[in-house]
Image: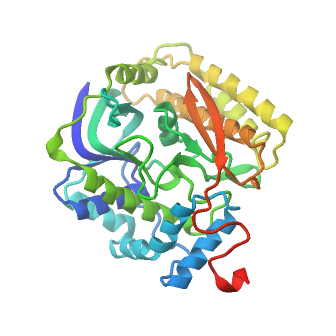
Amino acid sequence: MQTLDTDIVIVGGGVAGLFAALCAKRARPELGVTIATKHALRADAAPGDAVGQVAGDEAVKRRFMAAIEAGRWRNDQELVWRLANAAAVRLLEWREAGGAPGCLAQLVAGGVRPLEHHRALDLIPAADGGGVAAVLMLDTGSGKAVLVRAHAVLLATGCAVASCDGMAMALRAGLPLRDMDLVQFDGDAASSFNGGVAIASDGSTAMQGLYAAGDVAGGVHGAKRVAGNGLAGALVFGAAAGESMAAAANPSGGFADPDPAALAEAERRAFAPLGRRRADLASVRARLAETMSGDLGPRRDAEGLKRARHALNNLAASIAAMGVPDPQLQDNSDWQDRLDLENLVLVSHAIGVAAQADDWDAAKLHTTLVRAEDERLVAATEPVAFTRVRPGESLLPQAAE
């Protein structure tokens, strides 16, 4: 297996990933930074037209209250406070950098290593239990595994409805996903997932050395995101993570040894489908879409949630048994589709578990956390921490009167 070493590896080349890399290199130009992308690294990310991002104390408070109220008080208030304070500055920096094209040009000129057509498979913990040691990746062209060792790892994969790789990786690594029940819908179709990997305001996670930013992270938006806050959140927390990783990186300290058992299991899981009986992936995808738009759609009830949980258990069993008859490693699109669908079923299962935990009542003021334990997903709830303002109160004096 090929091994690559880098101070920082960023998984995902969207706004959050690009801006994190830029901020990390600005903070410490001497660090080695690698951006790994599932497909070609493209400079067509969002141009920077976030809505209403103006500076000033009152504007900050208005932005904060708008996000909290739209999110039905389910947001992490410290994340929203950071977003409200930093959005205008980060958006200006993004524009001054030239958006995605300019940012990418600066990164290439600054020596950032692009690792294109490399899909991230799993996070590999350190053998001594000291956090994340590496990311196991797959060169989709050659079909060979690549181990990328790093001092810090950023998940910036977004959450496209096609796979949700980053969230699935986090679950398999034992990390909690928060508020996965909070899905926004456009008609019958899911338009955005507002839950994701639980993060602190600097983008750090419960796993030492691992950070998350952008749509893969949860807690910023609550039940509903305000227009423009998707881009603003990617910039603010991408920058926070980039600067935090740069500060924490210790090139002279060497690289942690990956846990050999975890590495072997991750490689086994990824390559196991090859040469096995043909999978009816289209059927699984159709059944999954029916469940997610039906019993786990915008209108949920207790009986429907039970049906969804049963259906998702069956889908997980189905996808585990499905293989790809062609054992070819190079450019095997069926294999990639199978890996995508496995991740999507896992994350969909997390949505179902979270929804059932709170009976899909977004008015309940608690946070739902889903994690993997003993090869199954379990959920727990805890009260929302009202660290800045409580329901019925406001930071705006005229609104509170």
Above or below for 270 versus 130 = above
Is residue 123 rendered to the left or right of residue 25? right
> Which quarter of the figure is the N terminus placed in?
top left
In the displayed orientation, state which residue is furthest to the left. 252
In the displayed orientation, state which residue is furthest to the top. 276
Along the line of sight, the residue nearer the viewer: 368 or 96: 368
> Which quarter of the figure is the C terminus placed in?
bottom right
Is residue 200 rendered to the left or right of residue 396? left
Q: Residue at x 41, y 20 (%)?
A: 265
Residue 81: percent from left, percent from top: 52, 68
The image quadrant of residue 235 is bottom left
Q: Residue at x 61, y 53 (%)?
A: 194
Q: Count the marks: how many?
A: 0
Residue 71: percent from left, percent from top: 67, 62
Above or below for 26 versus 211 = below
Is residue 330 rendered to the left or right of residue 371? left
Along the line of sight, the residue nearer the viewer: 361 or 388: 388
Residue 22: percent from left, percent from top: 30, 62
Along the line of sight, the residue nearer the viewer: 296 or 114: 296
The image quadrant of residue 306 is top right
